[in-house]
Image (tube, coloured by chain):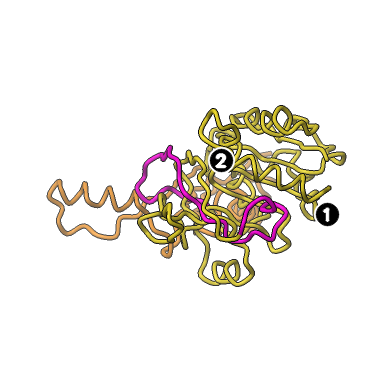
Chain colours: A orange, B yellow
Amino acid sequence: MAQKYHSRIYVTLRSSVLDPAGTAVESGLKQLGYTGVEGVRIGKYIELSVRATSEQAAREQLEQMCDQLLANPTIENYCFELTLVGEKR
Amino acid sequence: MKFGIIVFPGSNCDRDVAMVTQRLLKVPTRMVWHQETDISELDVIVIPGGFSYGDYLRCGAIARFSPVMEQVVAHAQAGKLVLGICNGFQILTEVGLLAGALIRNRNLHFICDRVALRVENAHLPWTKAYCNKEVITLPIAHGEGRYYAEADTLKALEDKGQVVFRYCLPTGEINELANPNGSLNNIAGIVNEQGNVLGMMPHPERMADCMIGGIDGKRLFEGLLITRV
């Protein structure tokens, strides 16, 4: 029996990779007066729904999706959250 | 010898490459739509510049799943020649034929310029028409051209002579001043370990006629013909 899971995927630049966009945003925030801000890093947020027979199966599919396409392991890390949406069929 | 130029939705340097191989060098050239699956008659595959699939997600990330790419990988694994220019270089790293990745330029600008490059390895099929350490001039046009690789990958590339082109000063000196995009070790182009797959951010096809600035790029293609004679 397949169940529908909602997933929120966070793709972030690995710490060894320079993030010039993050640096630019950080300087913008400082100009606004938020002088205590540091370490701004800009990543990607992806939402999707997936059908799977179990949470474990959904998790495995998502890991494959991230490894194959959604993230590039050379420069990025990823993590995701799963929520059961409802039962299907 | 026969060239094949892969055309993705969003490729925009495909015809510039054909202009060099077919019109200037008179070598048979076929445009290969990305849905094709038989490229066995081709000797050199060129993945041209452009914005395949709108550069969505990451540059080259979606193009690598086009049907033709499986054949391009097989072509490369058979030891045959594959050249990726600009977006083509990004696609070759995404598909895993070349190490590392190309990320946002350090200054966040799309850079459209003409740069000096030093030929770092003239013993490859790609560089037969160049001398070792020769300084050439080629155009660049990219927003995501900063070469990045893990420290151990970078060391392996350097140790094995896989860095082919480096951004340099017109005098040949390699330093930060000559680095347009923040690439590690000023890297502009690399080959795989076997040397048959080349990826480069500069555009050799746009420097193939004295009328438009020089022929330093045409020599890359001419060198390939020397190899096979």
Q: Tell me which chain the residue with mark 1 is part of.
A: B
- Label 1: which residue? B78
Distance of label 2 from label 1 (alpha carbons): 26 Å
Is residue B105 located in the magenta-colored stretch of the structure?
yes
For the point 40% across and 54% down, which residue is it?
Answer: B178
Which disc is residue B151 wearing? none
Q: Is residue A78 visible?
A: no
Position of the C terminus of chain A by quadrant: top right
The location of residue B43, given as percent across then percent down, is: 81, 43
Crowding near pointer 1: few (<14 within 10 Å), some, many (20+)? few
> Can residue B211 be seen at all in this image of the molecule?
yes
Answer with left or right where residue A28 lies relative to residue A13. Answer: left
Q: Which amino acid type is shown beneath numbered disc 1?
A: Ala
Subunit bearing disc 2: B
Magenta residues span B102-131
Q: Quadrant of residue B17?
A: top right
